[in-house]
Image (cartoon, rainbow, N blue to C red):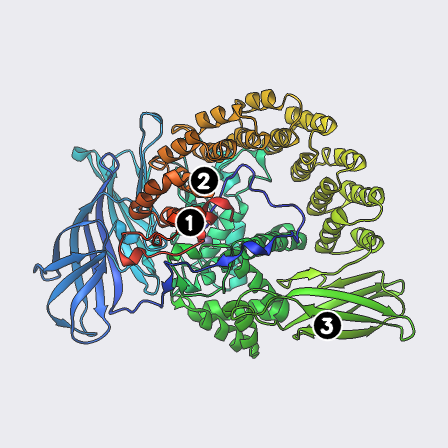
Amino acid sequence: MLVLLFLAVALLPAAGWPQFIPAARKPFGDAYAKEHSERTRSYDLQHVLLNLTLDERRKSVAGTATLTLRPLSPGLETIEVDSAELRIHAVTLAEGARAPFEQSGETLRIRLPRPAGPSDVLTLTIEYDGTPRKGLFYVTPDKEHPRRPAQIWSQGEMEDAHFWFPVYDYPNDKTTSEGFYTVNADFTVISNGRLVGVTENPALRTKTYHWKQEVPHSTYLTSVVAGKFEKYGERAGDVPLEYYVPPGTGRDKALRTFAETPAGLRFFADRIGLPYPYPKYSQVTVQDFIFGGMENISATTLTDRTLHEEASEPQSSSVDLVTHELAHQWFGNLLTCANWADLWLNEGFATFWAAAYREHRYGREEYLFELLQERTRYLEEDQQRYRRPLVTSFFAEPEDLFDRTTYQKGFLVLDMLRTLLGDERFFRSIRQYARTYQGRAVTTKDFEKAVEEATGENLGWFFDQWVYKAGYPELAVSQQWEESERRVRLVIEQTQALDAMTPLFRMPVDVEFTTPGGTKTFRIEFSQQREEFTFALDGPPVITRFDPEDHILKTVRFSKPATELIYQLEHDPSITGRIWASGQLGSAGGDQAENARALQARLRGDSFWGVREAAATALGQIKTAEAREALANGLQDKDPRVRQASIRALGTFLKDENAARLVKALYDSDRSPVTAAEAAHAIGKIRANGALKFLEKAVRRDSDQDVIRRFSLSALGELGEKKGWKIAAEWSQYGRPSQTRLVAVETLSKLGPREEKTADRLIALLDDPDLFVRQRAIQALGDGGFQKARAALRQKADTEAHAFTRRAAQIALKRLADQAPASSSTSPPEKPARSARSATRMEPATAVALSLVP
Ligand SMILES: [Zn+2]
């Protein structure tokens, strides 16, 4: 699964190694957290047969679920099936006899006529109907969206499948499945596996699609999508690729969106060493999807927001989304985490493979740049929100694990393993793991064992510190040239605070010295709190590169004089070194004019766009007139990302009319709507003369994905003029584009903090039909300290069906309780009234869903 955010300005700082303030870190587990060990099974589910009528007008599902299963121990008298908010009418055994049943909470208990054991195969047909609040979603036209085409789509992960069909709903069991789905005759149904047939029922004006998935899978990967679509197809070898997009999208846009699918499929099959395992691969874009993408087995569902104009590339891109979900078809679907604690085996792997595809397709520098960005994202979570081990079974809801530790750190750990083992041994280990465990539910121990079998190396120490413990080395490195000995003395200190989670780290690392006589690399290993190493060299080094490609998850303080930084900026062969030097120069003292000149040269001449972007950002930090003139170079760059970074940097020149003039020119002329949008945002940040008038007009400008409007609304928040509140209120209304409303909600709370009208508007949005708007309003109420909202938030915490949103309400309540005057802070902790299954915790993934993650 990929949580995608289309935030107006959720853009990373261009240069890595951000300076966060660690003080804000809170514990991962809150009052709602508890231990979640892997679920015990009493039977093995073997086949699921759904025969369902899906009615978009009544938003209902009705029919039967037939479960074939085998008890795992003798004497089983009751079969427990997960089922939530469904009306069960009857349960019938294979021989036609009715079985008595009872429902409590989210469990359906079926009493067998006689005890059954492992030699029995039971078939239970459950007749039911329901109007699901989640699991299955119905998008329909309404008064505000009269032309919105109707669609039905499912979303099973994490444990929401049993909200639309009764089933064993936990990832540690695999079953084959098939579905007969009867829908409105105008609809097409897309589901898992192969299409067996379509039957027309003219009298009822319906059609029945029969899909069959013959490779066993965990039930959360069961999917159905129904609606009207344009369909395009191509092949990757023997595998048919099917792309379903909304009517009117057109061939060009569809094929461009999914362009990397055939090459991605061939690359993964080749590198993983297992051919694509299913009879087809379909990707369907749906409306109002609650995530970026979901890797349902052989039938991925994606948000339609990934469709974009060519002019919006590369800032808008489907490449990572498409390859992430495609990689899941192996890691996630063929090998599935046995419990959510091991979710990184799905998500960290998919994130790694998307980056590996980038490397294969666009080159090594793109991979290293991805690594740098993902590390920045992870460090932000670790330093500003919470620290947790990559594998942890202590959480409130599984949704909380969809965070940057699982995705980003998971990727970083795989990259470190790759660097440690070298490509040959690393990919051989991956192939061993995939081959051995395909078709099974896996834990981290299985992966560890496969790596050890493939390489013969005991890597217990590696997994222990990076996977089961948390944090990373926070290094202080210093060096001294000892002329008399002709050697460099290097001191490495681990300065992280040690605790039960955070150990001293042991890691091999390369140190490379360049002297006028040449370049020498040494591999050393650090493991102590403070260590000294000496290296004989022919002269004092002009550059010292510690971990030259920057693979180790760490922070480093390594003070270098500006002269060495400038030399490194020009000569470091690795993009990571040049980007690091840019960031250092941005905040370095010394001769600012000299630093700006060096950065300008990089901005004009570096071969890699990411270094040019970092140079622009650093010039924004220097903020002198020379820096501003240097940034004008970046506005001419052929890569829109560099133009965008240059505009963003110019946006830091408060009240600078020269900067505003440069930026406005791009707003009018740039062919990239994203770049133009950034220009509008910069006008607000600069607080240029006439900015309000400018932004009022910009808010009315239409563009691909509404990007200019979104950035302009955000800019109104930056500008801080009261008049912007009314504009934001208007754009927060139901009926406006969803992503634009999210920004408008943020601007509202920015411009009207602690004001009655803001509280009232946000509270009204708590009942909005749009899940994300509800969630954003909840967060804004908590962040803004609106005590008035407590009753409304408590109600959300008790009744909201979606875990992400429910968790957001719990956290907002906690925030309000913390901020409340002393008299009310002694009230009992805010707890939900729902079942134990919905027990919950603290600073969770809810924020992630809306803040920023791949
Ligand atoms: Zn994923």
Give the residue number, with chain letter if any, for mark 1: 822
Callout 2 environment at 10 Å: few (<14), some (14 to 19), or many (20+)?
A: many
Callout 3 environment at 10 Å: few (<14), some (14 to 19), or many (20+)?
A: few
Mark 2 belongs to which amino acid?
Ala
Q: Are marks 3 and 1 in contact (CB under 8 Å)?
A: no
Q: Nearer the viewer, mark 1 or mark 2?
A: 1
Callout 1 environment at 10 Å: few (<14), some (14 to 19), or many (20+)?
A: few
Query: Could you tell me which residue is drawn at 73 percent across and 36 percent down?
Result: 634
Q: Are marks 2 and 3 in contact (CB under 8 Å)?
A: no
In x, y percent, where is residue 505?
61, 71
Q: Nearer the viewer, mark 3 or mark 1?
A: 1
Query: Could you tell me which residue is drawn at 12 percent across and 59 percent down?
Result: 101
CA gap between label 3 and label 1 equals 57 Å
Say which element carries label 3.
Answer: strand
In x, y percent, where is residue 288?
39, 38
Give the residue number, with chain letter if any, for mark 2: 780
CA gap between label 1 and label 2 equals 22 Å
- Image position of 33 (left or right of 167): right
Q: Nearer the viewer, mark 2 or mark 3?
A: 2
Say which element carries label 1.
Answer: helix
Residue farthest right in this picture:
484
Instruction: State which tag comes first along the sequence, 1 or 2.
Output: 2
In x, y percent, where is residue 155?
35, 48
Give the residue number, with chain letter if any, for mark 3: 523
Instruction: State which tag comes first along the sequence, 2 or 3.
Output: 3
- Image position of 555 (left or right of 763): right
Query: Could you tell me which residue is drawn at 45 percent across and 45 percent down?
Result: 292
In x, y percent, where is residue 650?
70, 34
Q: Is residue 255 above or below residue 827?
A: above
